[in-house]
Amino acid sequence: MAQFMFPAIGMDLWALLTQARSPLAKDRHRDAIQKILAKNPREEGLFLALADLLLPGFEAQIKNAIESDNDTLIMAAKRARKLIQEAGASSGKHVAELQSDEVMKLVLKGQGNAEKGKNLYMQQGCIACHAVDQEAVQKGPYLGSAGSKFTRDYLIQSILDPNAVVAQAFQTELVTLNDGTAHMGFVTREEDGIVDLRDIAGAVKQLKESDIKKRDHQATSMMPPGLALGLTVEQFIDLIDYLGSLKEGGK
């Protein structure tokens, strides 16, 4: 993953950057993250990451660094500004501007950049729910072999309309307990009177069958719709190319 290229930034700050721009982030969480980042940290790793992820919205931090007396920091900040501005200028139509069938046609025939798609996979928050490494905590469907298991059109449709293709092993259940509380997730194990229910964040709750009042299968996926709407068609192609590059035994 790209974050290992920048030891100076640290995993915590990298996570803040990706979460701040992820469509999965709740508004209150995004606001809290922005307040932390608004302190104008003068770290070279921050600007290396901004350039790598092409994240807009950090002009205050970039300006603050350029006005410093640290030549290395100034160069990193100027490079980040240049790459982010170039990315913004070259962006085309967004997925939200087109009908799903138009997007499907464009992405099916398009050829993108898998490395850029890898960064988008982090930036869009996909990594929060889908592992690409067998050693990582498994949450939603494993995507480390997406390129060998799924066709390109299946991957596109899965993101555009998550409810259209829900993997059988990840069908959502709403479990209501005798005390009136409800839990949503997918069942990963049923044994010895215990039901393991994993939510979209990967957290597993162990529920006693004797405490369960009812279990309802949901027709919808836990994956929220609209995650690709903020991407340009070119970016979406990059993301699909990255997923397609993930083969069995690869990362």
Image (spheres, rainbow, N blue to C red):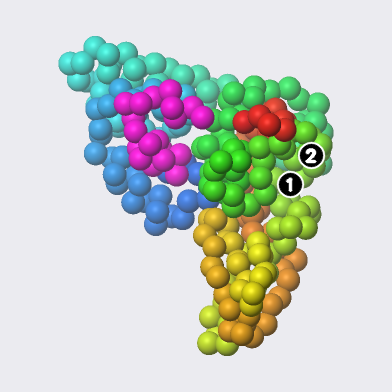
Which residue is rendered at x = 54% and y = 48% of the image?
Answer: 137
> Distance between the Cα atoms at labels 2 and 1?
10 Å
Q: How far from the left and from the top, in percent, is residue 167? A: 76, 54
Residue 14 is inside the magenta segment: yes
Which residue is rendered at x = 65% and y = 62% of the image?
Answer: 188
Quadrant assignment, res 218: bottom right
Which residue is rendered at x = 43% and y = 27% of the image?
Answer: 4
In the rendering, which numbered label is found on residue 134?
none
Q: Are marks 2 and 1 in contact (CB under 8 Å)?
A: yes
In the rendering, which numbered label is found on residue 150?
2
Please state which amino acid type lies under the numbered disc 1: Ser
Element class at badge 1:
helix
Q: How far from the left and from the top, in percent, is residue 60? A: 30, 32
Give the residue number, with chain letter if any, for mark 1: 158
Which residue is rendered at x = 58% and y = 57% of the image?
Answer: 200
- Quarter the C terminus occupies: top right
Instruction: Classify residue 149 as left or right of residue 185.
Output: right
Which label lies toward us, 2 or 1?
Answer: 2
Residue 5 is inside the magenta segment: yes
The residue most toward the bottom is 178
Main secondary structure type of the part rendered in magenta: helix
Query: Is any part of residue 30 visible from this angle?
Result: yes
Query: Mark 1 packing: few (<14 Cα in 10 Å), some, or many (20+)?
Result: some
Query: Is any part of residue 92 visible from this angle?
Result: no
Q: Write the start and end of the magenta stretch as one range.
A: 1-19
Q: How far from the left and from the top, in percent, is residue 169? A: 74, 57
Quadrant assignment, res 155: top right
